[in-house]
Structures are given as C-alpha cells and as structure tokens.
Amino acid sequence: MDLGVQEKTAFVAASSQGLGKAVAIELAREGANVVICGRHRDTLEQTAAALQNTGPGKVLALTGDLSSPADRENLIASALAEFNTVDILVTNTGGPPAGKFEELPQAAWDTTYNLLLASAVEMIRGFLPGMKKQRWGRIITITSQAVKQPVENLILSNAVRASVVGLMKTLAGELGPYNITVNNVMPGYTQTARLDKLMAANPEFANVTEEIPLGRFARPDEFAAAVAFLASQRAAYITGVSLAVDGGWIKAIL
C-alpha cells in the first residue's frame, strides 16, 4: 500500500531507540525524510546509520533532551532550518517512573508534566505554522494504554498522559479546517527496554500476557505500522481518535 508520504518530512521525537526508533524506521521505509532526536549521540548515530539504508529520504539526527525547554527550542529550529516545514510530527518521550501517590514527591509531578505535556505543547507550537500554511499536516502522539485503563503503580503516567489526550482531542477540532489531523496512538505492552524496566520493578507483570487476548507482547514494528498509517494520506479522514495497539488488553468498549 502506498501511504503517500514520499517527500514528506517527519519529526519523530525520542527516536534513537524503542518505539520512536521503530516509527522512524517505518516512515523512512515509506520514503519520508525523517528527523530523529535523542539524548545520547552514539545511540543516535547508530539509528541514523540504520535509517540511511532504509529508504530514499534524507535523515537528520539531532541531539537533545525533550525535558529541556532550551533543547526543545533548538530541536525545532534545527529541523526547520534543514527542511523548512515538518509535515508529520510524532511526539514521544520516555515514560515517568513507577510509584504510588504517597511515594512520589512534588518534583516528580513537575518533571512528568514538563516531559509529557509541556514538551508536546512546545513541539506542536513550533511546527504548526508550517502545517497551517500548506494546509496539510499530521500530529500524532504516542501515549499509553493507561489513558484508557489506568495501570497499577503508574500514577504519574496515568494522570499526565490523560491530559495529553485532552489536548489532542481539542486540537483535532481546532485544526480540522486546515486539513491537519490529530491523533493518539496507545501502545500496549511492547517488547522494548522500557517494558523490561517495568517488569523488573513490578513482579506482578510477570504474568501480564495472560491478560492480553492475543497472548503475547507486541513487536515495535507492529506498533510503528499503525503510526505510519495515521501519518499517511490514506488516513486523511481519521482525526481525534486514540488508537490502541494493545492486543486487546483494554477492556473498555470505547
């Protein structure tokens, strides 16, 4: 299937590893120019090298910490200096630490707000003018299944990611007239280093596959395929949705 993203430019946040990397690879394979970013230059360069051999588009690798307002500003400016316009924005960050309410200090809440919500707001604000000018754009946020069905011991993620979904749903209404779609993708338990850490910190996760109707964890490329579809021309009439890629784990009807 031709997704119609050849020669489009995608910015995939936190993309040197994990789900972000998988999304970057998928978009590069479809012919898009891809901007990737991460905190560690060595990991970032390895990912950039892999992308160069994946598709015909250009690859720009930028070092930066999404929790830093100054770094976010530099990432936006560098991407626009290279490509002028970013057509597809995939917001993504690492997840906040596990813990229960009374175990977590106020600083942990402030850090999580800045990492998950403030970073999404700033990245959207930076790339939105170009999308509006050309009257085409895709904004996709990688959230979590926790926004539909809270996960025990992940109160920071459960609370703050839900606010990101509220932001995106509202933006879908505001930006529809500009032919800009705005969607969330909710990964379930996917085989990444993040999942390994959660399982190590939460022994009760050992049997979590028993709660998943498909009976296994997702592969990163399976998740990335869903994101690439929402970024495509084929998904031009889909906006304001939160798509679960969770093997059926979420029990809610809607």
Image (spheres, grey):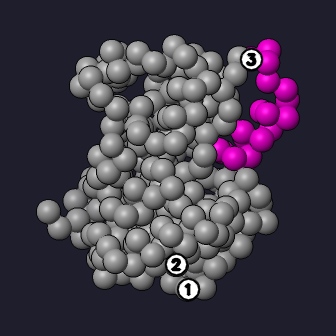
Q: Position of residue 160 (x, y in %)?
A: 64, 33
The residue shown at (77%, 58%) is 68
Q: Quadrant of the N terminus?
A: bottom left
| Callout 1 crowding tier (Cα within 10 Å): few <14, some 14–19, many ≥20 | few
Secondary structure at numbered mark 3: helix
Please name whichever residue, 104 or 166, is drawn nearer the observer in this view of the structure: 104
Cα–Cα gap, marks 1 and 2? 8 Å
Indicate yes or no whether the magenta region holds residue 193.
Answer: no
Which of marks 3 and 1 precedes in the sequence?
1
Cα gap from disc 3 to disc 2, whole angstroms: 40 Å
Q: Are marks 1 and 2 in contact (CB under 8 Å)?
A: yes
Reading the image, the residue beneath label 3 is 101
Q: Which residue is mark 1?
A: 82
Q: Secondary structure at mark 1?
A: helix
Q: Earlier in the sequence, mark 1 or mark 2?
A: 2
Please name the amino acid that badge 3 sits on.
Answer: Phe
Say which residue label 2 marks. Answer: 60
Question: Which of the pair 45/230 is nearer the observer?
Answer: 45
For the C terminus, the image quarter is top left
38 to 183, vertically: above or below: below
**Where does residue 100 sit, x and y in percent of width and height?**
71, 17
The residue lying at 52 percent from left, 42 percent from top is 193
At 40% from the left and 56% from the top, the residue drawn is: 22
Q: Which residues are magenta?
A: 101-117
Residue 211, compared with residue 48, is above or below; it is above
